Each structure stands twice: as structure tokens, then as C-alpha cells.
Amino acid sequence: MVPIPTPILRFVHVENLPTLIRRGGLHAPNCIPNDGLIYRPILSPSIQAARSVISIRCGPGGTIHDYVPFYFGPLSPMMLNLKTGRVTGYAQGQEPLVYCVSSAQAIARAGIGFVFTDGHALATPITAWFDDLVDLEKIDWPLVTQRYWQDSTHDMDRKRRKQAEFLVQHSCPWHCIERLVVINQAIKLRVENVLAHFPTSDHKNIEVNRDWYYHE
């Protein structure tokens, strides 16, 4: 059953929060402001190169890099790669990663273009694309929220479906981020210290939820 409101999650490095707030939100790779602000990349260069050329044939169109990608659930394969040091140039693990949580309905109410998938966006032509929230029922909801998602002999498509994405065109405004989720009290304190330098209108509720992170 589709959860309503439908959470969408994107994790960022805690050091990037000041830049995101100053920019007023999260921006797609093709739409990053030329403002000189520092942003610490935590993405796989090879995967990003592949995503940059994938065309989207529904909704507003464009390429994947015209959108800000969110997952529908925590514990993505990408976070596991960051935790285990499998992303070139990154070796800090999962602790500094902060989830920015919005909802599909909040993006739609804001009048922002979006599309979403039923699996990993690079798994074409298997992955299906949608631009109407009525099709959220096509997402494998039990799987996208599970801790364990490895393919099995009974289901060789689990990993792809786990990585279903909600893509927000151009940018996701900071006011559409409803809350932040962190791994422990130490990171919560770091986030609170960041937010203290900004107006209260930019502040978000911060939750500690260890279950959204992999076991050590």
C-alpha cells in the first residue's frame, strides 16, 4: 500500500548543509548555481557519467541530471557503498550522512516538475518511468523500506526495485524539506550548530534514527 504522504529521501554530507541552505535548496547537477560555494561530492563518478546521458521520455523530459534524485526508502545500496569505502575519493563512512526528507505530495503541491521510477534509473529498458502520483502503486513498497535487499535465487530483481527513485526537476526548495534524519546525537548536535547560523524559518526538526543506517 502506498504511504500517504509518500516520503522521499536524499542523504547529503553534513558539511554540505550550509551550502544547501544558502542556495535555498538542493539542485540538480545541470542546475547548480555558479556561486563559488563549497560542496563536498559523495557520488560515484562513473555512475554520474552514465546518468548524465540518460534521457527521460515522460513528464518534463530532459536528462536525469536535470533532476534532484530522491529514494523512497532508507538503506540504499549507495549508502552501503559509502559506508564500506567503495566510492572513489570518499572514506568517512555513513555517520556524516544526513537524510533530507520531503514527500511526493509536497513537491506536487509546490508545482515542481517530477518523474519517478519503479527501480534503478540506469536499469533500462527494465525500469519503468512515471509522471503521475497515481502510479506510486507501481513501487515495490515492502522492498524499498527493507534493510536487506540482495538479489536471491527466487528474485533476481530485488536490488533494482530497492533503488526506485523520485526525481525533482531542477531543484528541491529548502522549504519542501520537512525534516532531517541523522545516525546519532553527535551528528544531531552538528546539524543543530549549522542551523543556528540561519534564520528560524530555515530550521528543520532533526530526528535520530539508527535504523535508517547500516549496522556497524
Image (cartoon, rainbow, N blue to C red):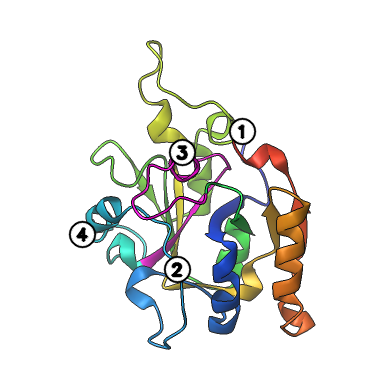
- Residue 18 vs residue 53: left or right? right
Looking at marks 4 and 1 on the same chain, the residue that comes earlier in the sequence is marked by: 4
Q: CA distance from mark 4 to mark 1?
A: 35 Å
Q: Residue furthest front?
A: 91
- Residue 119 vs residue 62: left or right? right
Looking at marks 2 and 1 on the same chain, the residue that comes earlier in the sequence is marked by: 2
Q: Residues within 10 Å of mark 1 (few under 14, many from 20)?
A: few
Q: CA distance from mark 3 to mark 2?
A: 34 Å
Residue under circle 1? 216
Q: Position of residue 169 (x, y in %)?
A: 42, 68
Q: Nearer the viewer, mark 3 or mark 2?
A: 3
Q: CA distance from mark 4 to mark 2?
A: 19 Å
Q: CA distance from mark 4 to mark 3?
A: 28 Å
Q: Secondary structure at mark 3?
A: loop
**Is 162 included in the stretch rendered in magenta?**
no
Residue at 45% across, 50% down:
91
Residue under circle 2? 113
